[in-house]
Structures are given as C-alpha cells and as structure tokens.
Amino acid sequence: MRTLVLLALAGLGAQLVDGSLGMAYGVTSSTLLLAMGTNPAAASATVHLAEIGTTLMSGAAHWRFGNVDWKVVAKIGVPGAVGAFLGATVLSQLSTAVAEPVMSLILLGLGLYVMSRFTLRGMPKGNLGKPLRKRFLSPLGVVAGFLDATGGGGWGPVGTPALLASGRMEPRKVIGSIDTSEFLVAVAASLGFLFSLGSQGLNWGWVAAFLLGGLIAAPIAAWLVRLVPPRVLGSAVGGVIIVTNVRTLLKSDWVGASSSLSTPVYVLLYALWAAALTYSIRAYRKEQTAETESAEERRPVAA
C-alpha cells in the first residue's frame, strides 16, 4: 500500500511538471520505475498506459484554458503515434540486461538536454504567430514518438523545446498542444507493448496509482502553466533525471562502478545541479526585473 501511495504522489508530481512545462511525465516516472528494479519494457508500458488517462485529462484541461492549437496536434500527433508504436516494438525485443542501460542512456541524454536547455536559454521568443509546416512537424513527431516509447519518455523533452525554439507559438500553446497530442502517442505505444508483451510484467495497481495521481494534477497543471517559471522547473526536473539515471548506469553491468568511484561522481552531479538551479533562479529574477523596468519606462508620465 505504501508503494502505491508513493507512486500516486510521484504521478501527481510528474503530471504537475509535465502539464506546466510540456515535458517530463514519462521521463520522471520511468526513471522512478527503473530505480525500483522494473523491467524497462514493463516500465515504459506502465507509464504509457497511465498516460492514456492523464493525457486525455490534461488535453481537455488545456483546451478549456485555450492552450491548444489543433492543427499542430494533428500534424505532430499522428506521426508521433507511428514512431511510438515502432519504438514499443523495438524495446520489447531487447533483453533486460541490454534494455536497462540503453533506456537509462536515453533518459540521461534527455535529462541533460532538459536541464541545459532551460538553465542556459530559458524560454525562447521570436517569430510568434508564423505557421509551423508539416514537413517540420511530421519528422519531429516520428522521432519524438520513437524515443518516447524506447526511453519511457521523450515526447515532451524532444517536442516541446523544438516547437519553442521555432518561436512561432506562445509557450502556453506549445505546452498545451504537446500535452494534448501525447494522447495519440500514449495509445499507440501502449498498443505496441501489449501486442509485443501481452500483460507480462505489468502491475495494474501501479498503472492505476500513476493514473490517479496524474488525473488529480492535470487540471491544476493546465492552470499553473501561466504562473510557474518554466526555466527554474526545467533545471530542477533535469537534475532529478540526470542523477537517477547516472546511478542506474553506474550500477549496471556496463560500468559496475565501485563506491570509491560513485561517491565523487554523485558529489560532482549534485554540485552541478545546485549551480544550475542557482543560475536559473537568478536569471529568472533578472528577467523579471528587466521586464518591470521596461514596463515602467513605457508608462506615460502624468502631467
């Protein structure tokens, strides 16, 4: 029972982050399941089955708050579903000894990208309002969907920064559209895992726990997307993903690191994580100060 409660809280926290940042539900949840010793394919399947419900709720909430561009959802979501089904099939064929470090490497790469992207650059602006072309969205969807299924997460970490970097959509609409289109990816990946694995290794209680936590958090996250500073959140979540997956790799047969090697690695990672968070908070405050000063300068002087 304690495990189910913890998983529900983890699902709630992961969905709060995902719904506010447009990424990290799958990466965060899969990282936790791997750390608990779950088979990689079963971990990804568990997360994607739970995501069918959470993404549906999240999409509805984002639509309610006007955060969704349905043209983008269709152009990126359908190719994403194709990539996710292929990725689930590939992961299901790998042995656990091979799949676990491979999955951790993918998650580590995504974690590094998330933390560095939001720590150093924050949320990009420019080209707002220009249309996004299908020849850009379709390949992006296939790649992001494939990584999402094989890594247990990746739809948001790949798709959200790519759309933000284009500068053609408001951040809230990028996040809302990515979260909504992820429903198609979750359904396709789940079908891929069920066709390849059946229900082997799946704990339906864990699926339900993740789902419950995510359903509670989804509408809150859709509202918070207007309030939470994504820069700081991205640095925090990226750090969690990096530290946890480095731990998995150090303990794997690929590395088999001793405690004398692992300890300094952890100290270095925590130091870098703290530095990234500090930098993000200072950068965010600096941006807020600059925006306030700019607004005051534009304010008309009373006669």
Image: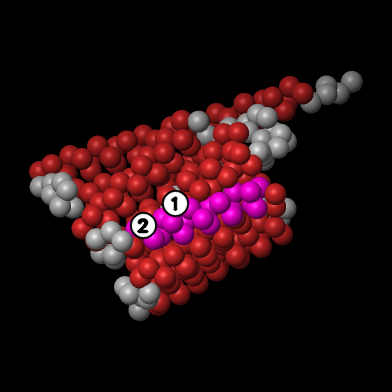
- Circle 2 residue: 90
Q: Quadrant of the N terminus?
A: bottom left
Dot 1 amino acid type: Phe
Q: Nearer the viewer, mark 1 or mark 2?
A: 2
In magenta, the rendered stretch is: 72-91
The answer to if 144 sits in the magenta stretch is: no
Q: Residue placed farthest to the right in the image?
A: 303
Are discs 1 and 2 less than 8 Å apart at CB? yes
Residue 225 visible here: no
Give the structural element (helix, strand or loop) at label 2.
helix
Q: Could you say where residue 42 lies in the image, as x and y percent from the top left?
A: 34, 67
Q: Could you say where residue 226 lies in the image, as x and y percent from the top left?
A: 64, 48
Question: How packed is label 2: few (under 14 Cα within 10 Å), some, or many (20 or more)?
Answer: some
Give the structural element (helix, strand or loop) at label 1.
helix
Q: Could you say where residue 77 lies in the image, as x and y percent from the top left?
A: 59, 53
- Circle 1 residue: 146
Predominant SS of the magenta segment: helix
